[in-house]
Image (cartoon, rainbow, N blue to C red):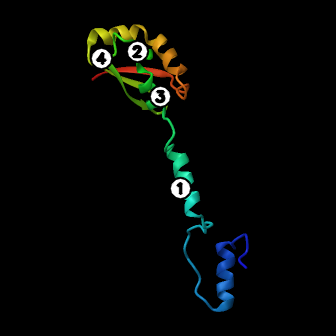
Amino acid sequence: MPSSKPFTRRIENLIANFRGLPENPSRSWIRPIRGVDDLVDSIVRKHRIGMASPQDAIRDGWVEIIGESNLQFAHPARIERDRCLVVAVNDAVVRQELQFNKALLLKRVRAVPGCDRIREIVFRNG
């Protein structure tokens, strides 16, 4: 029956010497064997597969955030470092108007579920 705790590399090399076997000079760690289901679960959690992302939530509620009149001139491009929303704007006048209303827009974005970590909005030409 295998032990629940593996031996350290030093102990394994000592046992190998007693048995007349070569030592293992590797510096790698001995990690416990994991099942495929554990691996898949950890990947799904890490990359949030199947879960709504903040980008999706912002795109779904973009009309309420930006307003109907500015909808054709601006769209959310990406979220950088989980805290900065980059908005692509293709009209200079609309960009200036959005810049004036930045605090209100940020408040609306932060009200979207999952977007409370966003601290800044940046308007770029696009």
The x and y percentages for residue 75 are 34, 22
Residue at 54% from the left image edge and 29% from the top image edge: 114
- Compared with 125, 103 (above or below) is above
Task: Verify CB contact (< 8 Å) between mark 4 and mark 2.
Answer: no
Residue occupied by mark 3? 57
Cα–Cα span, label 4 and label 3: 18 Å
Mark 1 crowd level (few <14, some 14–19, many ≥20, 10 Å Cα): few
Cα–Cα span, label 1 and label 3: 25 Å
Q: Which of the two discs, 2 and 3, labels the residue nearer the N terminus?
A: 3
Please state if 85 lies on the left or on the right of 74 as rendered.
right
Residue occupied by mark 2? 66
In the image, 108 versus 102, the foreground residue is: 108
- Compared with 87, 32 (above or below) is below
- The amino acid marked with disc number 1 is Val
Mark 3 crowd level (few <14, some 14–19, many ≥20, 10 Å Cα): some
Q: Which of the two discs, 4 and 3, labels the residue nearer the N terminus?
A: 3
Please state if 10 lies on the left or on the right of 28 as rendered.
right
Q: Spot the residue most to the bottom.
A: 20
Q: Which of the two discs, 4 and 2, labels the residue nearer the N terminus?
A: 2
The x and y percentages for residue 10 are 66, 75
Residue occupied by mark 4? 72
Q: Which of the two discs, 1 and 4, labels the residue nearer the N terminus?
A: 1
- The amino acid marked with disc number 3 is Ala
Q: Which of the two discs, 1 and 2, labels the residue nearer the N terminus?
A: 1
Residue occupied by mark 1? 40
Tell me the SS state at disc 2.
Answer: helix
Q: Quadrant of the C terminus?
A: top left
Q: Which of the two discs, 1 and 3, labels the residue nearer the N terminus?
A: 1
